[in-house]
Image (cartoon, rainbow, N blue to C red):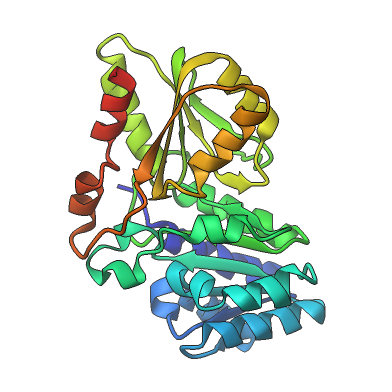
Amino acid sequence: MGQATRDAYGEELAVLMQENPKIVVLDADLAGSTKTITAKKACPDRFFDMGIAEADMIGHAAGMAASGLIPFASSFSMFCTGRAWEQIRNSVAYPHLNVKIVGTHSGIAVGEDGVSHQAIEDIATMRVIPGMEVYVPCDGAETKAVIRHVSQTKNPCYVRLGRSSVDDVYEPDTKFDFSKIRILNQGEKTAIFATGLEVQEAMKACRRLQAEGINPTVVDVCSIKPLDEAGVRQVLMGHERIITVEEHNVIGGLGDAIASVAVKSVPCMIEKIGLQDRYAESGPFQDLLKKYGLTDEAIYQAAKK
């Protein structure tokens, strides 16, 4: 088992703050949970605890960005995208300011905290904002690379991270190009597009299928927006069956992003695995993933059909 993506975020942010004096960090009284506390320890003079006030935090971040700084603003995904959506739209995206919004504890894997904390709409609500980039890394190595990448762009960005530890998909020294989708296994006939912790589930399903003589293509889509449409199109054209899987509502997330490419140039049937337009409940996150069809078993069965 590797580290949680939120832990990787805190580690990389601390390194970046020491490298770049323009980077500042804001948190909504959750530094111990979002792991920005690691950055605070590295550069306490550039860390700002804004209290339980995400809208105010985003407003301050916008002002800092307008002054030439590079703010990273963090809270749980449900709160930094939900409570502060208007401020993100009007104060960050509309003037196209260089603010990095990083939400941890996303999806139903937040577990026992329950529906009030389980962000399953955040990819959709961020993806729809003009000019907003959206990234969902799957493990520690990819998270560190994403955080470094967004620190070097000039665009508003949303990075979606998780609470629990996840298996490593990539080696620490892996080179990433976030303008491209990443094919983890090249197969035939069936292609599985996955994002976040569902990448690990897709790879588990892939290994089960390979043991039965079925070799699916597995694609890690970290950059939901901008999406590598050329790369997606090529995969769609080369496969008969398409499956998307995400720890998010099937409306507005990865599945719809892939379908938007298909409808323009490669019409095909797509099965979307995710929350089927419903909320989950409180409980151990592994039990929730199983109950709502977000484990390798659901992917395996979809590929076998």
Q: Nearer the viewer, residue 222 or 277?
A: 277
User: x%, y% of residue 125?
Assistant: 55, 61
Which quadrant of the structure image shows residue 176?
top right
User: Which residue is depicted at the point 38% across and 14% down?
Assistant: 215
Give coordinates of residue 239: x percent, y percent.
Answer: 51, 15
> Where residue 234 sits: x, y (%)?
63, 21
> Quick check: can you spot residue 32?
yes
Horizontal side of 13 relative to 203 (left or right) equals: right
Q: From the viewer's perspective, tell me whether residue 148 is left or right of residue 284.
A: right
Image quadrant in which you'd find residue 294 = top left
Residue extending furthest top? 213
Which residue occupies 67% across, 24% down?
265
Query: Up-down: is 189 above or below 99?
Result: above
Residue 25 image-quadrant placement: bottom right
In which quadrant of the rendered image does the C terminus lie?
A: top left
Question: Is residue 44 among what the camera can see?
Answer: no
Residue 279, horizontal then vertical, whole percent: 31, 59
Height in image: 134 above or below 223?
Answer: below
Closer to us: 108 or 45: 108
Residue positioned 56% across, 32% down in the render? 182
**In this orientation, which residue lies closer to the viewer: 234 or 161?**
234
